Amino acid sequence: MSRIGTQPISLSQGVDVSIDGGEVEVRGPRGVLKERFHADMVISQDNGSLVVSRPSDEREHRALHGLTRSLLANMVTGVTQGFTKRLDLVGVGYRVQQSGEAITLSVMLSHPVEIRPIDGITLEVEGNNRITVSGNDKQAVGQMAAEIKAVRPPNVYTGKGIRYAGEQVKLKPGKSARRAE
């Protein structure tokens, strides 16, 4: 039995859920999120909570059970609290500037890189080396943060680059360390 899939999702005050077959719409104080789920998954609303059940114990249904419940829980969290990811620019001369809704990265490339946010995502700059990506959709926030990090991922020898806040980059020894052996 799925440990995650069987847990009910409690709906806080101000969250309204409408279920139409496999399509679920969640409305809350921060906005509206819609998602279409697999037709076999049964989503029902009971006493201020959402419950996901599966029709059988087939492998595909077991896999979809926990996934559907997690996606629904992320939708409810997104319309009530939202999601944020922070990125740090590490390196001499690495900086970021806010230009309207977009940001401009100077990360030792031959040109500055301008990144525009996707719909529903806001990019904020703190200081000149920290970026905050926030929004209601967890998948979109993660995708936007990954696209920003992909401009200049951390170098494994020096540690310079764009990394998630709190991310530990394991540095490799250079050539001189190898020669000393």
Image: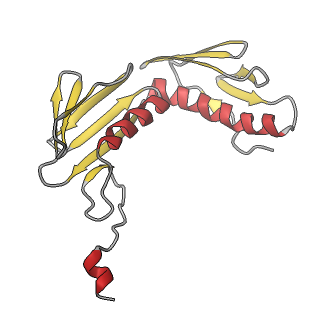
Image check: 36 left or right of 116? right
At which x and y percent is residue 27? 52, 15
- Residue 87 sits above or below residue 172 on the image: above
- Residue 118 sits above or below residue 133 on the image: above
At which x and y percent is residue 16? 56, 15
At which x and y percent is residue 35? 59, 19
Quarter the N terminus occupies: top right
- The single residue placed furthest to the left in the displayed view is 93
Question: Image quarter for residue 52?
Answer: top right
The residue positioned 49% from the left and 32% from the top of the image is: 139
At which x and y percent is residue 22? 70, 17
Figure disc tally: 0
User: Between residues 74 and 103, which one lies in front from this camera angle?
Assistant: 103
What colour-coding does the image apply? secondary structure
- Residue 121 sits above or below residue 108 on the image: above
The residue positioned 43% from the left and 34% from the top of the image is: 143
- The single residue placed furthest to the bottom in the displayed view is 181
The residue positioned 47% from the left and 23% from the top of the image is: 79
The residue positioned 62% from the left and 35% from the top of the image is: 70
Quarter the C terminus occupies: bottom left
Image check: 38 left or right of 119? right
Image check: 83 left or right of 126? right
- Residue 106 sits above or below residue 124 on the image: below
Question: Image quarter for residue 169?
Answer: bottom left
